[in-house]
């Protein structure tokens, strides 16, 4: 199981903006993932995602690693931002775009 935790750590460290979700951005498989991905996409920056339905080990290990029981989970610059409610709240206040813009690599806005 430690391999899975290592993989999670690697994904989080290699991707400045990372969304763990059910499904993918074009086809979210639950309402919360759908809402979260819409908020992240509306910020206009590229981001990575992991479909936890395709990765059952990550699905079981990430909540323990993150100390956050539910999905989706948004990670920015190695820090857990939170799940759907927090993402929605940050999007509503404009903070999400600020956070995502700050985390996006300089060359991403091609």
Image (cartoon, rainbow, N blue to C red):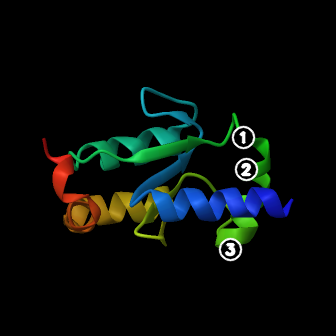
Q: Give the secondary structure at mark 2.
A: helix
Quadrant containing the C terminus in the rendered view: top left
Left or right of 70, for residue 109 = left
Determine the residue positioned at 44% across, 56% down. 15
Disc assigned to residue 43: none
What residue does disc 2 label?
59
Are the residues tagged 3 and 1 within 8 Å (C-beta)?
Answer: no
Vertically, is 11 above or below 45?
A: below
Is the residue marked by circle 3 packed among few (<14), some (14-19), or many (20+) residues within 10 Å? few
Q: Give the mark count.
A: 3
Q: Dot 3 corresponds to which residue?
A: 67
Compute the Cα span from label 1 to label 2. Answer: 6 Å
Asked if labels 3 and 2 touch by Cβ distance under 8 angstroms, the answer is no
Q: In the displayed image of the protein, which residue is found farthest to the right?
A: 1
Q: Residue at x 72, y 51 (%)?
A: 58
Q: Residues within 10 Å of mark 1 (few under 14, many from 20)?
A: few
> Residue 33 location, x and y as percent?
50, 43
Q: Are marks 1 and 2 in contact (CB under 8 Å)?
A: yes
Whole-number angstrom distance, CA of label 2 to CA of label 3:
13 Å
Tell me if residue 108 comes above or below residue 61 in the rendering.
above
Q: CA distance from mark 3 to mark 1?
A: 18 Å
């Amino acid at each position: 199981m430690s391999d899975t935790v290592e993989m999670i750590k690697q994904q989080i460290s290699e991707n400045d903006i990372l969304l763990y979700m059910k499904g993918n951005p074009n086809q979210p498989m639950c309402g919360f993932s759908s809402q979260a991905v819409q908020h992240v996409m509306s910020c206009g920056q590229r981001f990575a995602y992991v479909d936890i339905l395709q990765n059952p080990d990550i699905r079981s290990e990430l909540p323990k690693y993150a100390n956050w029981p539910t999905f989706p989970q948004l990670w920015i610059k190695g820090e857990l931002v939170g799940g759907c409610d927090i993402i929605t709240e940050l999007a509503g206040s404009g903070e999400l775009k600020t956070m995502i813009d700050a985390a996006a690599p300089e060359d991403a806005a091609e």
